[in-house]
């Protein structure tokens, strides 16, 4: 254990003191903040070219008014279509909307024409269609002698409010939404973290093998000790990085709140520790955020956090040991790693897609069984944890994952001890399988 700890310390300190690690750790959260800010600006920016559109509506279907939308300015004209087209040719207008008469008030489909050599953008088309649909709806109401106030009174916003029977737990209409979001985020994070740091273990092994540094290390260390030291060292680096990001998240939230005009210091409504949230009172964006935060507080984090950490470490150790074994089997040609890592990547990719399904249906047969299958469970079960799965399913999943992790580490150690000193020979799956039973 002392030698494993020495390798772990060396691997950890070498990476943590690296300038790339420091810059990546500090700048990644800022990069995400800038990314979302820029994305928000880009998504909220439409066409800035003002377009004067003349509406030809002989039947008076729109009532002589049409609400302008962003850069689209509408005006009505009684001139015939040929005269309006001449105005377009002279550059006086940007386009012409030709409205046809409505056959009857029960007509579900309505088509109108837009005359112009310049195409409208997608958002502009949606804006025009929405404005005209609204005016036609008002026209139908007038023709049918239906009052708008009466029609509005008929509309009802129905909200499902969950109530438990056997469990002593209060739920709200936001519980499923928040659980789905948390489960999806955790599943994605688990996939990328395991893949990222597992790949780092493989690259570290490959670099030391190619540079012949491993020959010096093996003279005073057993191959298994070296492999476990690397796995532990890189794992601690990842844990350190994640810990720093978790500390920086509140800062990013405050900055983002200030940018989008939210008062993060405002008094949060007293909704109780676990009282159901009435969505009828949630009207503003800030109140919605407070409602979600209140729902997050009611979740059983004493169960979710420890189990999520367990699945992360168990999944990381299992996959990292396999990545280390692949790194030891790769020769001078680094491209060999792509072929050998494919079987390792398959369970990860399958788990991610099952995670998609588990977010929408956490109690489906696929999600339940996948959350107990080793390797796949390291991603699928954390997705299900916010939905409070039964303890017996968690217990089976934990036991099977631990057993599989230990088995894979042992098999990876057998491959590593042979492959790390194997040069000049291309290793395939058949060759690697022989290394497992090699007794040298």
Image: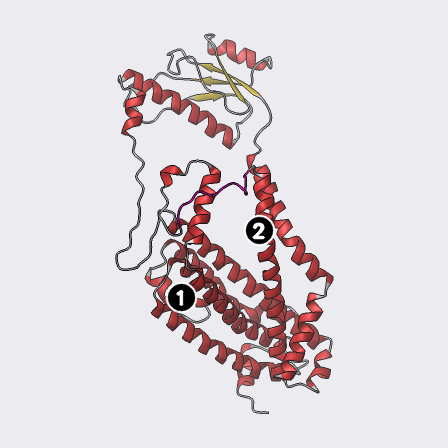
Within 10 Å of the Cα at label 2, are there few (<14), some (14-19), or many (20+) other Cα atoms? Answer: few
Nearer mark to the viewer, of 1 and 2: 2
Snapshot quadrant of residue 131: top left
Q: Which residues make up the magenta segment?
A: 262-272
Tell which of 306 and 65 is nearer to you.
Answer: 306
36 relative position to 10: left or right: left
Q: Spatial distance from mark 1 to mark 2, Cα to Cα?
A: 31 Å
- Which residue is at a point 42% across and 12% down the rendered structure image? 64
Q: Which residue is mark 1?
A: 371
Q: Earlier in the sequence, mark 1 or mark 2?
A: 2
What is the quadrant of the C terminus in the image? bottom right
Q: Is residue 264 magenta?
A: yes
Tell which of 419 and 371 is nearer to you.
Answer: 371
SS at circle 2: helix
Number of numbered discs visible in the structure rendering? 2
- Give the number of the disc on residue 250: 2
Tell which of 118 and 270 is nearer to you.
Answer: 270
- Which residue is at a point 60% across and 74% down the rendered structure image? 232
Q: What secondary structure is the stretch in magenta mostly built from?
A: loop
Q: Is residue 223 magenta?
A: no
Snapshot quadrant of residue 112: top left
SS at circle 1: loop
Residue 272 position, x and y percent, is: 39, 48
> Residue 103, can we see it?
no
């Amino acid at each position: 254990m002392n030698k494993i700890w020495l390798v772990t310390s060396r691997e950890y300190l070498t990476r943590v003191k690296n300038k790339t690690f420091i810059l990546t750790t500090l700048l990644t959260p800022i990069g995400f903040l800038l990314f979302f800010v820029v994305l928000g600006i880009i998504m909220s920016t439409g066409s800035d070219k003002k377009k004067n559109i003349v509406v030809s509506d002989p039947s008076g279907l729109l009532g002589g008014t049409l609400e302008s939308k962003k850069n689209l300015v509408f005006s009505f004209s009684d001139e015939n279509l040929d005269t309006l087209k001449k105005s377009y040719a002279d550059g006086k207008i940007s386009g012409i909307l030709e409205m046809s008469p409505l056959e009857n008030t029960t007509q579900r489909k309505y088509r109108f024409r837009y005359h112009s050599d310049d195409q409208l953008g997608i958002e502009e088309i949606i804006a025009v269609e929405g404005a005209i649909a609204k005016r036609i709806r008002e026209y139908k109401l007038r023709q049918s002698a239906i009052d708008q106030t009466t029609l509005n009174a008929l509309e009802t916003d129905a909200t499902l409010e969950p109530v438990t029977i056997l469990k002593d737990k209060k739920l709200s209409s936001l519980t499923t939404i928040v659980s789905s979001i948390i489960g999806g985020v955790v599943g994605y994070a688990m996939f990328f973290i395991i893949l990222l740091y597992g790949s780092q273990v493989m690259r570290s092994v490959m670099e030391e093998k190619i540079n012949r540094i491993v020959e010096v290390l093996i003279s005073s260390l057993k191959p298994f000790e070296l492999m476990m030291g690397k796995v532990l060292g890189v794992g601690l680096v990842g844990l350190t990085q994640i810990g720093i990001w978790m500390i920086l998240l509140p800062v990013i939230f405050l900055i983002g709140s200030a940018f989008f005009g939210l008062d993060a210091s405002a008094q949060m409504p007293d909704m109780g520790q676990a009282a159901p949230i009435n969505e009828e009172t949630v009207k503003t964006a800030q109140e919605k955020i407070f409602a979600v935060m209140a729902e997050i507080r009611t979740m059983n984090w004493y169960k979710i956090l420890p189990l999520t950490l367990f699945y992360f470490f168990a999944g990381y150790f299992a996959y990292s040991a396999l990545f280390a074994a692949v790194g030891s089997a790769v020769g001078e040609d680094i491209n060999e790693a792509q072929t050998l890592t494919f079987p390792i990547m398959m369970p990860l990719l399958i788990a991610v897609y099952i995670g998609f399904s588990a977010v929408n249906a956490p109690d489906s047969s696929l999600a339940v069984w996948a959350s107990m299958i080793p390797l796949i469970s390291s991603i699928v079960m954390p997705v299900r944890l916010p939905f409070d799965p039964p303890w017996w399913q968690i217990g089976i999943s934990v036991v099977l994952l631990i057993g599989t992790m230990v088995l894979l580490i042992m098999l990876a150690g057998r491959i590593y001890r042979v492959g790390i000193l194997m040069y000049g020979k291309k290793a395939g799956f058949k060759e690697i399988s022989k290394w497992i039973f090699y007794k040298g």
